[in-house]
């Protein structure tokens, strides 16, 4: 029986552009969404930038291959003094699902939030995302909130 190589979680780097774009494309496709090339350019630049209002990114690397990504953001909250952390995107390549990649990425965001002094981390998913929800039920707490948005 073979075991998978360990997964390393690290910040996104400039040389990660191509595998990041491939994984983000697959992530967006899962949610039946696309964005124009300019959004890829803007998002990648912001992920590498130093503006504290912008998103941050972590990637999961295994055997020299990027196998997952997460984007997260710190922001103020009217009910708290400290900032909170919104985990917007989480993706693990299909061939690595169930091997701990998603959990490692979420724990990486938890560690970043702790280092930032943001004890609250939250995220959204669609109700049909059963595979991810099995992980989320083990690593987070389901809340009763229902999301609305402008039409």
Image (spheres, rainbow, N blue to C red):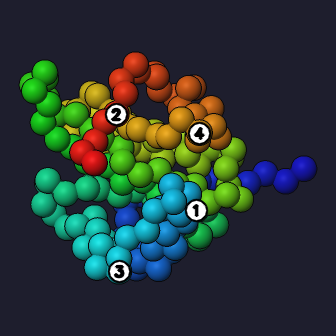
Q: Residue at x 67, y 58 (%)?
A: 94
**Which residue reaches farthest front?**
151
Query: Disc 4 designates what residue?
Result: 128
Q: Nearer the viewer, mark 3 or mark 4?
A: 4
The residue sitting at 36% across, 48% down in the picture is 88
Residue 93 left/right relative to 19 = right
| Mark sitting on residue 37 | 3
Q: Residues within 10 Å of mark 3 (few under 14, many from 20)?
A: few
Q: Which residue is mark 1?
A: 67
Of the numbered discs in the image, which one, if any, rests on residue 147? 2
Where is residue 64 shown, x and y percent of the image?
Answer: 59, 70
Residue 13: name its quadrant. Answer: bottom left
Give the quarter of the image for residue 113: top left
* Residue 1 on image: x %, y %: 90, 50
**Alpha carbons under labels 4 and 1: distance apart:** 23 Å
At numbered mark 1, what does the secondary structure look like: helix, strand or loop?
Answer: strand
Left or right of 93, for residue 43: left
**Marks 1 and 2, how far apart in space?**
29 Å
> Could you tell me which residue is drawn at 45 percent across and 21 percent down?
141
The CA distance from mark 3 to mark 4 is 28 Å
In terms of secondary structure, where does tag 2 sit?
Answer: loop
Q: Which mark lies nearer to you, 1 or 2?
A: 2
Q: Nearer the viewer, residue 145 or 91?
A: 145
| Mark nearer the viewer, 4 or 1 | 4
Does residue 150 sit above or below 69 in this rendering?
above
Which secondary structure, mark 4? loop
């Amino acid at each position: 029986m073979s075991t998978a190589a360990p997964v390393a979680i690290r910040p996104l780097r400039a040389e990660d552009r191509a595998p990041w774009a491939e994984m983000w494309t697959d992530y967006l496709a899962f949610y039946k969404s696309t964005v124009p090339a300019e959004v890829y350019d803007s998002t990648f630049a912001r992920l590498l930038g130093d503006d504290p209002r912008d998103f941050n990114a972590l990637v999961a690397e295994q055997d020299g291959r990027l196998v997952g990504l997460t984007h997260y953001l710190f922001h103020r909250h009217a009910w708290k003094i400290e900032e909170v952390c919104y985990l917007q995107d989480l993706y693990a390549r299909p061939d690595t699902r169930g091997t701990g990649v998603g959990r490692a990425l979420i724990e990486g965001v938890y560690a970043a939030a702790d280092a930032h002094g943001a004890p609250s981390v939250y995220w959204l998913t669609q109700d049909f995302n059963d595979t991810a929800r099995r992980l989320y039920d083990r690593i987070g707490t389901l809340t009763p909130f229902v999301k609305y948005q402008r039409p």
